[in-house]
Image: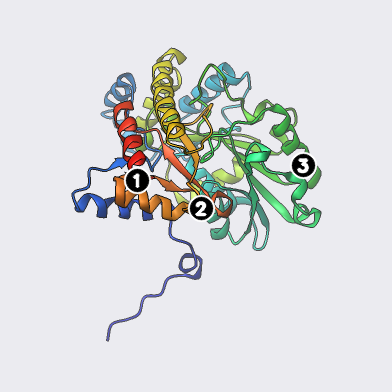
Amino acid sequence: MKKTIELAGRVKHLPPYLFDKIDKLKKQARAKGVDLIDLSIGDPDIPTPAHIVDALKAAAPKPEHHRYPAYEGMLAYREAVARWYLRRFGVTLDPGTEVLSLIGSKEGIGHLPLAFVNQGDVVLCPSPGYPVYTIGTMFAGGEPLLMPLREENGYFPDFSAIPVDVLKQTKLMFLNYPNNPTSAVCGRGQFMEAVELAHKYNFIICHDAAYSEVYFNGKKPMSFLEIDGARDVAVELHSLSKTYNMTGWRIGFAVGNADIIFGLGKIKTNLDSGVFQAVQEAAVAALETDDSILAPLRDTYRARRDALYDGLKAIGIEAMRPEATFYLWAKVPARFNSESFAVHLLENAGISATPGNGFGEAGEGYIRFALTVDVGRMKEAVERMRKII
């Protein structure tokens, strides 16, 4: 008799992971011969810069890289991160205690609650927001409390709407600016408000800054660690994925409060063995790149943004013109909800996009387009939408 294999409760009760579900729908469409225009996943279509690839090629044969890497990352990598932070944000970091390598920032997001969240602790998560904020919280036994991001509030949480008794139970808050999925940016005053709240109620802030280098018109987003008092309560996560088109390389870093970095490192030493050191050497080459190499990438995304934004506006779909990220957050036409519009686009126009409610209830009524196809395909997508709306 076949034995029944039962999933653990923490897995059984998870909602389907949004992007896995989207991948399956795309595979089904392609199997039917659909010429798919994929605007769903934030995976850059532009290759990693050649000098970074060359650095990997030079590092990979070195025998010292064929053994287990250091859990916290090579000192040379952590020193490169610290130099980049000083150059980019004017923030000084101790590479020994305030910098930690990550297998992409997603790993840090998922592991941070395991280090600090006890059963029943509240974790404040943005909605709409990256699904791993809530999933990582659930894995740790915490209680995710969703902070709605509303258009009228600049897609920043309204902290005054959070009850005091909830704040007293809060162990961790996730923030993410420039924001995925809304593409919103925020200013110094909003970050200051978050830092003051964390000090008052004694909780940790994790700022996910994966999109800080994808910005337009010279408007550079700031680091959360630039705020006075932030280092007492916060860590900031970065990924080389979006900045240098390195999504498949799986490398990022956490920086900030030494005690938080230490706690996250304790989880890493028990659950992974670090990043392949040849990849870390390539990441050093990336971080030491003059910022001028990123200007053409930003120009490319800006051209795509304008093509999609202008096209959507012309066919009556309301959207915000992004100042950062490579996403465009648009309102769905009145006769649809988020999911039905995404299905309508896929089935009738061969366009894959991400329904806003997949990022949380507050995303209902919106859809996210990723700027990951060239301008020609972007204009074609708009023309296909024009015919079915």
> Residue 300 placed where, x, y %?
38, 22
Q: Residue at x 56, y 47 (%)?
A: 128
Q: Which mark is residue 388?
A: 1
The answer to the question of whether label 3 and label 1 lie on touching residues, with beta carbons closer than 8 A, is: no
Can residue 19 be seen?
no
**Which of label 2 and label 1 is nearer to you?**
1
Q: Amino acid at mark 2?
A: Asn
Tell me the tag on residue 300: none
Mark 3 nearby-residue class (10 Å; few <14, some 14–19, many ≥20): some
Q: Residue at x 47, y 39 (%)?
A: 317
* Quarter of the image where the C terminus is located: top left
Q: Foreground residue, 324 or 261?
A: 324
Residue 72 screen position, x and y as percent: 50, 37
Q: Amino acid at mark 3?
A: Leu
Q: Position of residue 384 (x, y in %)?
A: 31, 39
Badge 1, how many Cα within 10 Å: few under 14, some, many 20+? few
Q: Which residue is mark 3?
A: 197
Within the image, what quadrant is residue 339 found in?
Answer: bottom left
Q: For marks 3 and 1, give the CA distance.
A: 47 Å
Residue type indicated by callout 1: Ile
Instruction: Tell me how far mark 2 sits from mark 1, CA to CA.
Output: 22 Å
Residue 117 quadrant = bottom right
Foreground residue among 196 and 369: 369
Residue 54 lies, with reference to residue 184, above or below; the image says above
Identify the residue under disc 2: 357
Indicate whether 41 appears above or below 320. below
Mark 2 and mark 1 lie on one chain; the one further toward the N terminus is: 2
Q: Do callouts 3 and 2 mark residues in contact (Cβ within 8 Å)?
A: no
Identify the mark nearer the N-term, 3 or 2. Answer: 3
Measured as percent of width and height from the top left, residue 191 is found at: 70, 33
